[in-house]
Image (cartoon, grey):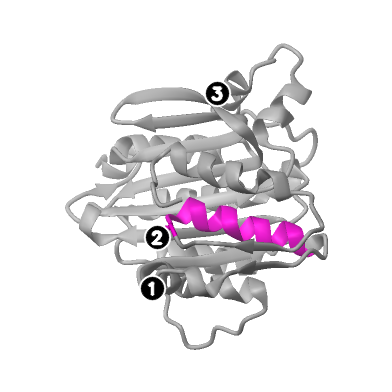
Amino acid sequence: MNKWDVEGGVRGILKATDRYANSQDPLVLDLARCSFLSAEATALLASIFLVRRKMEASTQIDSTTVQWPVWRHLQRMWFFSLSGIEEKGIAPGSSLPLFHTEALEKDRILRYIDEEILGRPAMPSMTPSLRKEIRRAFFEVIGNVFHHSGSLIGAVVCGQIYPNDNEIQITFLDRGVGVACKVRSWLDSIEDDKKAIDWALKRGTSTLATGTQSRGLGLYLLREFIKANEGQFRVYANGAFLEEASGRRTYRTLNPPLGGTLVDLRINIRPDVEYGFQQDFEN
């Protein structure tokens, strides 16, 4: 895990841990060769702890192997609380600390969105109407976990601000059925995970049969915002991976597959720009 890149990092963690996913044997993670953890890496490692805790299987990090920058990062992410270690008084700094919920607790989720995501000064300036819809979109992405995924551990959210790169990373993860598998089970005409992800990202599409909890606009709006911001948008689900960056869309196969869905947003820090809907700027 010492080499981190867009695709190889996620694959690296999946390859290293896939064989232990359903094992009752004690698992100790050796991070001696890891010099950096991004938000999606942190979320994936957190999900391993959470899934195995449900199985009552022992999971630990060998603290003697962890380099100081990685240890400090995990502390600021409030990661060690997953191992039962109290972490009081540790300021998150540039980290958007781990948020984990096993239920659709509206007030708690919105508080995290308001304080740890939208409330950060590094977030791009938005008109009130766009900010309201982006807030709603973040909530919908988390809500989809409970309406669609069947995730054993619920939802995991975290992120990181990279001041030197002028970038904010926000990651959403569940370890459920996975959006690609869900779409394919819903639509017989779609047999490919890549096409399933593409369908899930279209405006207004949803596999929710009843109710009004999800309008299918969350990922679509976030995707459009990322395009306007010239950031990076990534979705990992089951056996496929989508990346949109610099005006290009790339699909790749994910092997071993991810059981669940990981949405990774990279937003450019732009203090010189205010974002909004077209009508917001019309007199």
Residue 170, how many percent across, how many down?
45, 53
Q: Amino acid at mark 2?
A: Gln
Asked if disc 3 and disc 1 are in contact, CB closer than 8 Å, the reply is no
User: Can see residue 104?
Assistant: no
Of the numbered discs in the image, which one, if any, rests on residue 160? 2
Q: Which residues are magenta?
A: 33-53
**Which residue was labeled with disc 3?**
198
At label 2, counting other C-alpha atoms closer than 10 Å, the crowd grade (few under 14, some 14-19, many 20 or more) is many
**Which residue was labeled with disc 1?**
68
The quarter of the displayed image where residue 80 is located: bottom right
Q: CA distance from mark 2 to mark 1?
A: 17 Å
Residue pictured at 73% horizontal, 44% vertical: 176
Magenta span: chief secondary structure: helix
Q: CA distance from mark 2 to mark 3?
A: 26 Å
Q: Nearer the viewer, mark 3 or mark 1?
A: 1
Residue pictured at 57% horizontal, 43% vertical: 262
Q: CA distance from mark 3 to mark 1?
A: 40 Å
